[in-house]
Image (cartoon, rainbow, N blue to C red):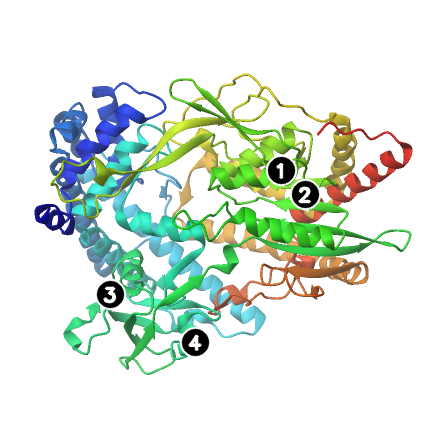
Amino acid sequence: MATSCTACAQQADFNEVGKQMAIMLQNSHFARIQYDAKLSQLFLDDYIGDLDSGRLYFTKVDIDAFHAKYGERLHELLLQGKSVEAATEIYRVFEKRVEARVALTEKLLKEEAFDFTGQDSVMRSRKDAPWPKDEREAVETWKLQIKEAVLGETLRRELMTKLAAEKGKPDPSKTDRDPKEKISLRYKRFLNSVKDVDDEDISSMFFSSVSRAYDPHTDYMSARDISKFKDDMKNELVGIGALLSAEEDGATKIMGIVVGGPADSEGTLKLNDRVVAVNTLNSPRPEDFTDIMFMKIDKVVDLIRGQESTSVALKIEPAGAPPGETKVVVIKRGKVALKADQASGEIIDMKKSDGTAERIGVITLPAFYADFDDGNVRCSVDVERILQRMIDEKIEGLVLDLRNNGGGSLEEVRRMTGFFINRGPVVQVKNTLGQVQVKEADNGRPMYDGPMVVMTDKSSASASEILAGALQDYNRAVIVGDSSTFGKGTVQQMMDIGRMLPLFAARNRAGSLKMTIQKFYRPSGSSTQMDGVVPQVVFPSLSDALEIGERYLDNPLAHDRIRPAADFNAADPQVLFVPRLKELSQERLKANKDFSYIIDDVVKAKERIRLNKVSLNKEARQKELDSEDAAQKARNTERRERFSKIAEQDKASMKFMKLTLDDVAKPGLREYDPSAENAEYMRKAKDENADLDDTPKWPSGMDPVKRESINVLRDLVHMTENAKTAGLLRKAN
C-alpha cells in the first residue's frame, strides 16, 4: 500500500501513458479505425503540422527523414512504450530549426538593408505550401518572411501616426519600439516558448496529434488542460481575478481586473501593471520568486492560480513608474466567477405603429456550461431562472442567442430543450455498436410556448446544434443566422488514463483522453455532423468566406442519417410562417446598408484567399492600405449619420432592461443603455491603438444580425397573433 502511495506522488511514465491511450483508442473510439501503418502516417503528419503549421522551420529533407524512420512505426512504438523518445527527437529537430531561424532573424535585422521597391511577395497562408526542399531554400523563404514582418510593422506604425495626426490625438507609436526591435523581441519570445518545454509538454502535443488522427474532437488532455477545462465548464476559477497578456519584451501585463475579485478587493494591483516574477507560495525568501520573463502565458497562469485562501506574491513594475522600479503585491487567492460567460438576458419594450408596446426577451448563452464535480453550476438552471422572470414580465416573443456557443454539456441541452417543447425526443445518440438511445425532455409541458427565434452562426456547435436542430425539427422555433452551424455531431467522454496504468505505476499528471464514443442525431434522424443546422432564414456573413466548420478540419467523421425517433411528433410547419418570414427578411436585407457592406467584404475576402499573396513592395502595399482606409472612412462617414438617426429612433421607440443572474430575484427591471461600455464584470485597460479607430458603434448595441433577428421575431409575433385571432393556429407539440 505504501508503494502505491509513493507511486501516486511521482509523475507518470508518459511512454506508458501513450501505450494505454493507444489501447483505449482501439477499444473505445466510435469509428473503430484500423490501427496500422496508414494511421501511423496520420499521427506523424498531424504532429509535424502542429509544430510547424506554416512550413517555415522543417525542410523536405527533415520531413523525408521523419517519414523514413517513423512514418510506419509510430503506432507500434506507442504499444511498445517507446513513442515519447520519437516525439522528443522530432521536437528537438524543430527546436534546432527555430533556433537557427531566430539567429538568422537577428542577423538580418542587424545587417540587412531591406529593399521594398522590388516585386517580391510571400504567401498569405502556407498551410498547403510545399516544404522548403533544403536548408538553403528554407533560408531564402525565411528572409522573405522577415522582410514582410519589417514592412508590415513599418506600415502599421506609419498608419498609427497618420490616424493620430488626423484625429489630433497622441501618437501611440512614438513610445513604441523600433520595428526591427519589436520583431526581434517577438521571435525571442517564440524561441523561449519553444525551449520552455518538458516531457509532459512534448508528450501532450504528440498524444493530441495521435488522438486527432481518429477525429478532430478526440484529444489528449494534460493535467493542465483538464484543470482549465473544468474551470471553463463551471465558469469559475481559483485565482486573483486578473486578465493577463504577454508583452513582446517578456513581461506579463495586467489587461483586466475582475470587479469584486481578489485583486480588485486587495486594491494594489492596477491596470497596465507588468508582472515580472511570481512567488507562488508567498514565502519571504527572494530566491523563491520565479522569473516569468518570456514565460508562456499558460504557465504564468498556473503559477498565479492555486488553492483557495492561500496567497501569491507578484513582483510588478507599476504602470507609469520609472523603468526598473518594482514592488511586491501579495493577494489572497479566491473563487472568481466568470460572470461575463454566464447566461444573461434583456427585455426590450418596443413601440408598435399603433402606439402600444410589445415586449420581447433576449437570452444570450455563451456555452452549455456545468460543474461536473459537484453540480453547483448549471446553465440550464440559469436559463430557467431568466426565462421564468421573462414569462412573469409577460414577454410576447423570445430570441435565444447561440452565436459563438461552441457547446458543452449534453445533459444541460437535453434539459433546456424541454423548456420549449412537450415531453418528447430531444436527441438520439448512437454508439459504436449501432445501438441508439433516445434522450427526452423532462417537462410534461413547456415553460414557454410563445413565438421564438434562435440565432446561430458558424461557431455554434455541438450542444448548440442539438438545441437548434431539435427546435427546428419540431417546428417550434425559427432558426436564423449564417448559412449553417459548425457541424459537430459527435459526443465525447473524458477517460482517466491513470486508471488504466499498471497497478503500482505512478499516476500523477497522467492526463485524460477526451474520446469520441457516440454520434448524435436530431429527432428527425439527421445527423448534424458535417452539415450542421441550416437556418430557415439566412443572413449574409463574413464567415461564409472563411474555412470555418467541421468539414474544414482534418479527419472528420461522415454525415449520415438514422430513423426518426419513435415518439417524435412535429408541429405543423405552417405555424412558423417561414415562407413569409423569409420574404419579409429578404426585403429588409436588400435595403440594409450594413448587410451590403458584409457582402462586399465577403467578395474581397474570397479574392484575397484565392490569390494567397502579399506584396513586399511598399508602394503597392501603401496603395492597398490607402484604398482600404478611404473605403473605411467613407463607410464610417455614412454610418455615423445613419447610426445617429437609428439611435434617435431607438431612443424614442425602445426601452432596454438588463436581466442578469443577479437581477432575476430583484423587484423591478433595471433599465440600461446597451450602447454604453460595459465594465460591470471587468475593468479593462485602454488600448491606445484602438482609440484611434473611429468606427461607430452599433446603435443601441445591436449589430445587424441581432437587429434583423428581432425583426424576424416581431414578424412572427404579429403573424401568430393574427392567426390566433382568425382561429387558424393549431399546435401538435
**Mark 4 residue type:** Ser
Q: In this orientation, does residue 418 appear?
A: yes
Q: Secondary structure at mark 1?
A: loop
* Residue indicated by mark 4: 265
Mark closest to the chain's N terminus, 4 or 1: 4
**Residue drawn 28% across and 61% down?**
300
Mark closest to the chain's N terminus, 3 or 2: 3
Q: In this orientation, does residue 206 appear?
A: no
- 250 displayed left or right of 643: left
Give the number of the disc on residue 292.
3
Q: Secondary structure at mark 2?
A: loop
Mark closest to the chain's N terminus, 3 or 1: 3
**Mark 2 residue type:** Met
Tags 1 and 2 touching, CB below 8 Å: yes
* Residue indicated by mark 2: 447
Q: CA distance from mark 2 to mark 4?
A: 40 Å
Camera-side residue of 63 and 284: 284
